Amino acid sequence: MSEKIEKSAAASSAQTKPPAAQVPATQATSASVSCPSCTAEISPAALDANLKVCPSCGFHFRMEPGERIAYLADPGTFVEFSRSMTSLNPISMEGYEEKLSEAGRKSNLSEAVVTGTCEIEQIPVVLALMSFSFMGGSMGSVVGEKITRAMLKGLKTRRPVIIYTTSGGARMQEGIFSLMQMAKTASAAAELDRAGIPLFMVLCDPTTGGVTASFAMLGDIAIAEPGALIGFAGPRVIEGTIKQTLPDGFQRAEFQQDKGFVDLVCPRRDQRSLLVKLLKAHSGGNA
């Protein structure tokens, strides 16, 4: 079963050359979007229809939680929970409230993660989807709590948990309170493991810092999007520290798969079918 899944994902991955980096779309004209990898100009409608993937080179633009929900969840089944939770200012960091307000206006989100229940091919699951557009997807006390509650929801209802990660790491504006979320989320992941409830991770660009060092790497299966940056410290920080030139593709999804850090790299268009196979395999159905 796992061999079939890996072969399928590998075949799909081979069809697109992974880009060197992933960044938000930039406007070439008012009617097109310029691909940061191949510079092709794409109409917004064509980009949306292709799941925010460049049709010319396979570059994966970043997606928002709502876009992923529309692709993954059976229509009308997603029910959000913990939506009203918002961050406070636990260490009285100057300007933090203003940054939160600005992030909310720009992203139309209340925090850097959206959590809820849904069905995927009529299989009940718990979903958590992070957003890089809200303060770089940083994990503060609310993000950590929502991720933890999502895993505990899976524990209580015995639903598999699927988490899409994208984050620059712990939120520095909350100091030690953000770092505490690493232990909390890791503890919740351990509870799922003890109960035999699957935890599937989809690592998106970028997944770094305290998120990588905690729950993001504790899933039963670690799937990565093509070209995603996955690591703790970034390549420039590492090069500056060790005074050496890093190899090409260092910390990118394909590099991490080659080194055993992730299980497989799966293009966005194939992720739903892959997750369905994994969910059916867990439930004893025909995958």
Image (tube, helix red, strand yellow):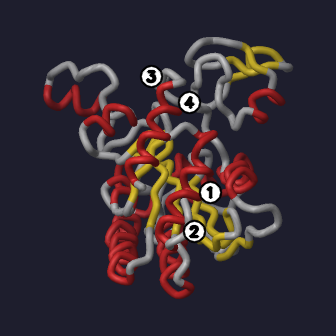
Rendered image quadrant of residue 176: bottom left
> Which residue type carries mark 1?
Leu
Rendered image quadrant of residue 77: bottom right
Q: Are the residues at dot 1 and dot 2 in contact (C-beta closer than 8 Å)? A: yes
The front one of 204 and 272 is 272
Earlier sequence position, callout 2 versus callout 4: 4
> Which residue type carries mark 3?
Ala
Query: Which residue is at a point 80% across and 19% down the rendered structure image?
Result: 32
- Secondary structure at numbered mark 1: helix
Query: Which residue is at a point 49% across and 21% down the rendered structure image?
Result: 17
> Which residue type carries mark 4?
Val
Kindly report which numbered mark, 4 or 3, lies closer to the viewer in this rendering.
Answer: 3
Q: Is residue 209 above or below residue 156?
A: above
Residue 51 coordinates in the image, percent (x, y): 70, 37
Q: Which residue lies furthest to the bottom in this view?
A: 156
Q: Which residue matches tag 4?
A: 23
Q: In this view, does 75 lie to the left or right of 115?
A: right
- Secondary structure at numbered mark 3: loop
Q: Which residue matches tag 3?
A: 20
Determine which of the numbered discs, if any, sits on residue 100 in the image: 1
Residue 81 coordinates in the image, percent (x, y): 67, 76
Earlier sequence position, callout 3 versus callout 1: 3
**What separation in Å lies between label 4 and label 1 (alpha carbons)?**
22 Å
Q: In this view, does 233 lie above or below 71?
A: above
